[in-house]
Amino acid sequence: MIEFKNISKHYQLKGQTLRALDQINLQIPTGSIFGIIGYSGAGKSTLIRLINLLERPNAGQVIIHQKDFTALNARELRQERAHIGMIFQHFNLLQTKTVAANIEMPMKLLGWNKAEREKRLNELLEFIDLKHKKDAYPDELSGGQKQRVGIARALANHPKILLCDEATSALDPQTTKSVLELLKKINREQGITIVMVTHEMDVIESVCDYVAVMEQGKVIETGSTLEIFSQPQHPTTKSFIQTVLQQQLPINILNNLENQNQHSIYCLKFLGKSAQETVIQAVIKQFDISLNILFANMTEIDGAVIGQMFIQLLGDASVIQQALEFLQANGVEVEQSGVQA
Ligand SMILES: Nc1ncnc2c1ncn2[C@@H]1O[C@H](COP(=O)(O)OP(=O)(O)OP(=O)(O)O)[C@@H](O)[C@H]1O
Ligand SMILES: [Mg+2]
């Protein structure tokens, strides 16, 4: 487990104190893919850089696998750091070195001999599927290929932890997907704990087991990805989720409605697909109102389906009220819906 205990980090700027991290308490389970999301300036990079103490906190402890990293001396810290890999948004490859030389760099720094380096290099090139680019230079590679080289370099010394700061932010959606798949494979096959900083909720959705949401140097919400998606509490978390799940009814659907009374439109949120079908059928059967399904979508997280459905309810106001109460009593979250402009 990676544990942040009461971590604070301040910067002095023009005589003012900037609280980049403010009393952070967070636990990252070993073997998980843990996402840290937040808007620009929230403190994500500062937090991830504290894990290998590239930044030192002003207060608090960083405890990794029961060892207090903040109490290590320089030599001990160097040894521990060698088991933590890091990849970056802009890859940070040496432009004047070949793919092979970039990947071998950390092995050289650790004093491995040529035979050991060759062996590990070939394993890694195989793993990232770039054997044919061994002698190429970084500017001859695509963004996705560069990030694969960055990943191979980070894995060279068999790390236990891999830190990723916006590792896919410079990549197009298709390439992002393949890099995320590679990271997932590293986590599942090698049991490496991955900490992933991002500002994209779909990155969290597609690979993270847990997520922490940051704002102004604080962790405002944390939990399993499924919990956060199904029951977000904080407005900032909700706005991140909005970027993945369509939260408003598309305007063209509204325009095509016969009765355009917006007060008759509701957004329902469900956990589980079968739950959704059963409860809707029950409403139609039990209440003398017309229920019109306008739009539905769903997303799958950890095998669980989170569904969202926009419906129009027309009929007697008190019966509609009863139907809404029935839905809520059956675990469906109900909101009167806005319309997307
Ligand atoms: N070396 C530094 N000196 C002064 N202020 C800093 C320093 N590093 C970070 N900060 C400030 O700390 C706050 C948090 O920065 P940080 O880089 O951690 O944010 P972030 O969440 O990673 O943002 P982004 O999404 O833009 O990368 C910001 O207000 C930033 O300006
Ligand atoms: Mg950052």
Image (cartoon, rainbow, N blue to C red):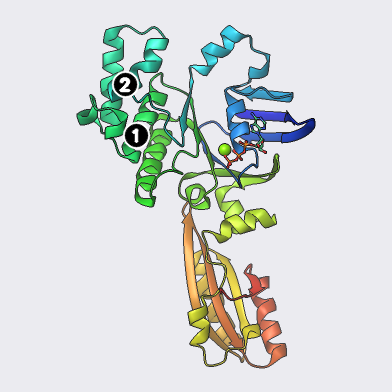
Q: Is residue 173 above or below residue 168?
A: below
**Residue farthest front in this picture:** 14
Count of numbered tags: 2
Location of residue 7 (image quadrant): top right
| Amino acid at circle 1 | Lys
What residue sits 28% from the left and 21% below the top?
A: 100
Say which label, 1 or 2, has the lower sequence index: 2
Q: Position of residue 82 (x, y in %)?
A: 48, 16
Cα gap from disc 1 to disc 2, whole angstroms: 13 Å
Direction from residue 32 to residue 321 in the image, left or right: right
The kind of secondary structure element at disc 2 is loop
The kind of secondary structure element at disc 1 is helix
Image-quarter location of ligand 2 = top right
Q: Is residue 216 above or below residue 323?
A: above
Location of residue 141 (image quadrant): top left
Residue, disc 1: 146
Q: Position of residue 279 (x, y in %)?
A: 56, 75
Q: Nearer the viewer, residue 291 or 237?
A: 237
The disc label shown at residue 308, or none: none
What residue sits 63% from the left and 21% below the top?
A: 66
Residue, disc 2: 97
What residue sits 37% from the left and 24% below the top?
A: 94
